[in-house]
Every structure is written in structure tokens, then in C-alpha cells.
Amino acid sequence: MPDQTIEKFETDPVVPPPVVPPPDVVAVNRRTIDGVLIGAGILAIVVLAVTAGLLTWGNQFADDYVGRELSSQNITFPSAEELTGQGRDDLVQYADQPLDTGKEAEAYASFIDGHLEGIADGATYADLGAPESAAKDAATAAVDAGSPQAEIDELQATADGVSGQRNSLFKGETLRGLLLSAYAWSTVGMIAGIAAIAAYIATALMAVLVGLGLIHRRRTTNNEMVLS
């Protein structure tokens, strides 16, 4: 029996264990990684710096444009006494000041709006379109019908009154719209200025990080590897 066992082991082939391949290993030079990060940081600095410059230009352009256009209108706020008499105590801080900033444009637009509300009981230029046409048609019809002159004069006065109100509303609403547009542009310019400051800060921070990266790269030897 023992002889048979030995003979079996001697004749049977030996099967080797399966070979397990080693895991993939990627070795990257540490200085290479630092170089890539530094390059990306420099690119970010350039982009941020250009963005900050454009935003600064936009802020200055908006301020100059709004100030120049508003100053050319030669608008001055009423006196403090007049503003108080009209119930506009909220505008007293602008009394007797020339209109040349976006914030002042918004304030004066509010001042105009208060006057517009009292012209035709809150009606707008568009609202008076139909009443004006009706009043003119009534005056014309009275003339064609040979109505008494007193009646014609009364109808014509009514038509002229509505036309006058409508013209006042048109001028007031147009000026108010222009002032609010100037205020909007000044607001856009202010936002651009804030964004420019943020971009400058980000540029400075990125420059610091790039500087630290350069220091780290100089201190790193060529044989330092990162395995992954």
C-alpha cells in the first residue's frame, strides 16, 4: 500500500498555484505634479487679472457716463422748504443739490412720480388717450352741428385740458424713465466695481498659492514619487 502511494505521487504532475498579477502602479514625479498645478495657477491669475481689469473699466465707464449725462440736464432739487411743503421730507437730504448721480436720479424720479399722480388722479399718458380723442371729437361735432359758441368753447376747453394733462404726463413719464435708466446703469456699474474688488482679491490669493507652490517645488527632490 505505501509503495502504491509513493508511485502515485511520482507519476502525477504537479500543478503550480495560479499566478496573481500585481496591482497596477503609476509612479508620478512630485515635481511634475507641482509644475502642472503651478501652471494652472498662473493661467488662473491671468484670467482673474483680465476679468478684474474689465470689471473696473465697466465700473468707471458707468459712473462717468451716468454723471456726464445727468449733469448735462442741469437739474437741481428744490429747496428744503419746498420739499417739506410738498410732503417730501424723505428728499430733504438732496435739497438744492445738482442731479449728477444714480442715487439722486432715483430720488428725483420719485419726486416726479409724486407730481404725476396729482395731474389726472393717477391716470397715465396711455390712460388719457381715449378721453382726449372723445373730447376732441365732441368739440368738432359741436362745431359741425352749429352749436352755440359758449358750448363749443366749453367743449374745446375740456379737450385742451385733457391734452395738456396728457402732454404733461408724457414729458414727466419720459423724464422719469430716463432717470430710472440712469439709476439702473449706475447700479450695474456699482455691481461691476464690487465684482472687480472680488476678482482682485482672488488674483492676489492665487498669486500667493502659486508662490507657495514654487517654493514647494524647489524644496522637492527629483526622486520623490507619488504612487497611485
Image (cartoon, grey):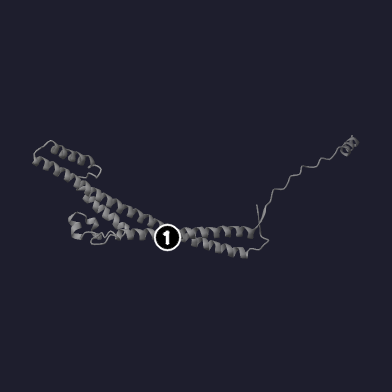
Q: Residue 167, relative to residue 211: is it above or below?
A: above
Q: In the picture, residue 96 is in which quadrant?
A: bottom left
Q: In the picture, residue 55 is in which quadrant?
A: bottom left
Q: Residue 181, relative to residue 9: is it above or below?
A: below
Q: SS class of the residue under badge 1?
A: helix
Please, which residue is most extreme toward the right here? Answer: 3
* Residue 76 percent across, percent down from the top left: 24, 60
* Residue 57 percent across, percent down from the top left: 42, 60
- The answer to whether residue 43 is left or right of residue 155 is right
Q: Nearer the viewer, residue 31 or 68?
A: 68
- The answer to whether residue 211 is left or right of residue 171 is right
Circle 1 packing at 10 Å, graded few (<14), some (14-19), many (20+), is some
Q: Nearer the viewer, residue 23 or 189?
A: 189
Does the rendering let one see residue 120? no
Q: Nearer the viewer, residue 124 or 159?
A: 159
Label count reads 1
* Residue 41 percent across, percent down from the top left: 55, 59
Q: Nearer the viewer, residue 2 or 222?
A: 222
- The answer to whether residue 227 is left or right of residue 84 is right
Mark 1: amino acid: Trp
Task: List the residue tagged with mark 1.
Answer: 57
Residue at (39%, 61%) from the top-left corner?
Answer: 60
* Residue 173 percent across, percent down from the top left: 26, 49
On-image quarter of the N terminus:
top right
- The answer to whether residue 120 is left or right of residue 100 is left
Residue at (52%, 62%) from the top-left corner?
Answer: 207
Does the rendering let one see residue 148? yes
Residue at (49%, 58%) from the top-left corner?
Answer: 48
